[in-house]
Every structure is written in C-alpha cells, then in structure tokens.
Amino acid sequence: MYDLPDELLVEAKGSIRIVTLNRPEDRNPASVEMLFGLTRLARALGEDAEVRAVILTGAGKAFSAGGDFKHFVATATDADYARAALDNARRFVEAMLNLPIPVIAAVNGAAVGFGATLAALSDIVLIADTAFFAEPHVNVGLVLGDGISITWPFLLAMNKAKELIFTGDRIQAADAVRCGLANRALPLEQLMPEAIALAERIAQQPRSALEGSKAILNMYSKAMMESVLSETIRRQFEQTQGPDHGRIAQAMIDRQKRNQQQG
C-alpha cells in the first residue's frame, strides 16, 4: 500500500493501518529508503479518508535500533547526502505532527535513536516490558535527534531529559512509563492485541473531533519547529561534517574492515 519500499509494510485492518518497520535481520535500522518512505507514508495516511488510527511497530525482536551503518557513514563523508537526509528529517517531523489521525507506537523491542524519535512523535506509546529506549546521538559526536528535541522536553522533566541525552543511557520499559515516555508497559504477547484494541476504540470516535484535538495538542511541539528544530538540524549538519563524528565514523569503518578481513 501507498507505494512504499519493502522495508515498510502496511496492513489494513478496517479503518486501522498497521505499519511495520521491516528489516528484522538488522533490528530495523533506518536506511535512506526507509526514512524517505516514512515521510511519504505519513503524508499519504493523512490524505486517506478511510483511516482512523495508525499503529507503528517493528518486525522481529526490535522496534528500531537507530540508523543503519551505511547511512551513518554517508552522513559523515558526503555533505550533500547529509544535507538531503536532514532536509527529509525536517519534512518527516512536520508530516508526523501534521498527521491528523492518532498514531499508536507498539514498541516491541529496542527503540534507539531514530526508534526513540518515532515513538516520541507518536500520540500514544505502548511498550513491551522487555523493551527499552535510548537516545545515543551524543555518543557518536552528534547533537540530539531532531524529533527528540521538540518532544522530550514536554514528555520529561527537563533535567531528566538532559541526563538521558547527555549519557545515552538505556531507559527500561518500567522507567519509561514512570518518566512519561510510554503510557504503559505490557508483556510482549499482549502488546499488539492491546494496541489493536486501543486503535479500534479510538477509531469509533468522530474523526473531526480527533483531528481537532490532536491539532491543538500538537501545537506545543509545532511551536518549536522554527526555533528548536531548525537549530537542531543546523547543528546536526555541522557535526556530521565535524571532527568528533568523523573520527567515530572512521573508527567504525576501520572496525568493520578488520572484521571482514578476519571473517
């Protein structure tokens, strides 16, 4: 559905759309195809008059383990690629915040970097009790993620957000619920049934009332678009081309080459 790459699966369940990140062998990292596809998908879902609710989840054991290796290296070595990727990042955040229908994240496993951003841009977050979040951009020489910059300060106490962003520490499911990153934690086998039941319940509500309510609530994050998000993306570009990120990216390239030679 919606003319998407194979890395994104969309299942129609009545007026609900279940979107699955589909790179399970690599723990669903965000490739360039997935990133640009998600932007198109968010726009298409908003234009689909039949849709009343969306569920986001990941195939296999992870929700999303962040950006993939090729994407990570390309942003550090190709300025044009980095700029195009960051331009798309802004469009994706805008598309998610403008998406008029409720989005439920069913976080089935690790949600790292981009995975944490996806959950933060959703409206309701259900998390498996074995899953976790992490925002490790600082660990690889980058400022915090784009969607994180305009959501976590609302979802968390600011000093807690700073601690988690400055360290890149994991946030286990129970802690994620306590600090506001998730609505509730569930055993993995109950996660999708609960997400579907909640989506079906929401889908019964008048769409105009849902759209209006979501638009009002998203004004808080959207108010940060021109200031916080613009500054985040500006600094992200500078740092993708900077010495800290470049050094870390090169170390990862060298390590991969050694592993390939040894293999």
Image (tube, rainbow, N blue to C red):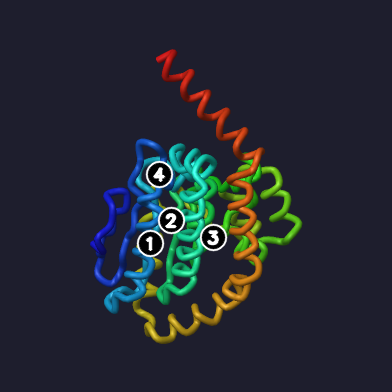
94 in relation to 19, above or below: below
Q: Amino acid at mark 3?
A: Ala
Look at 46% across and 55% down and name the residue there: 84
Q: Are marks 2 and 1 in contact (CB under 8 Å)?
A: yes
Is 254 drawn above or below residue 18 in the view shown?
Answer: above
**First along the sequence among labels 2 and 1:** 1
Q: Which residue is mark 3?
A: 120
Q: Is residue 125 above or below residue 175?
A: below
Mark 1 packing: few (<14 Cα in 10 Å), some, or many (20+)? many
Q: Mark 3 falls on what kind of element?
A: helix
For the residues bearing labels 3 and 2, Cβ distance under 8 angstroms: no
Which mark is drawn over residue 106?
Answer: 2
Depth-wise, is mark 3 or mark 1 nearer the camera?
Answer: 3
Q: Earlier in the sequence, mark 3 or mark 2?
A: 2
> Which residue was labeled with disc 1?
55
Q: Which corner quadrant of the image does residue 44 belong to?
A: bottom left
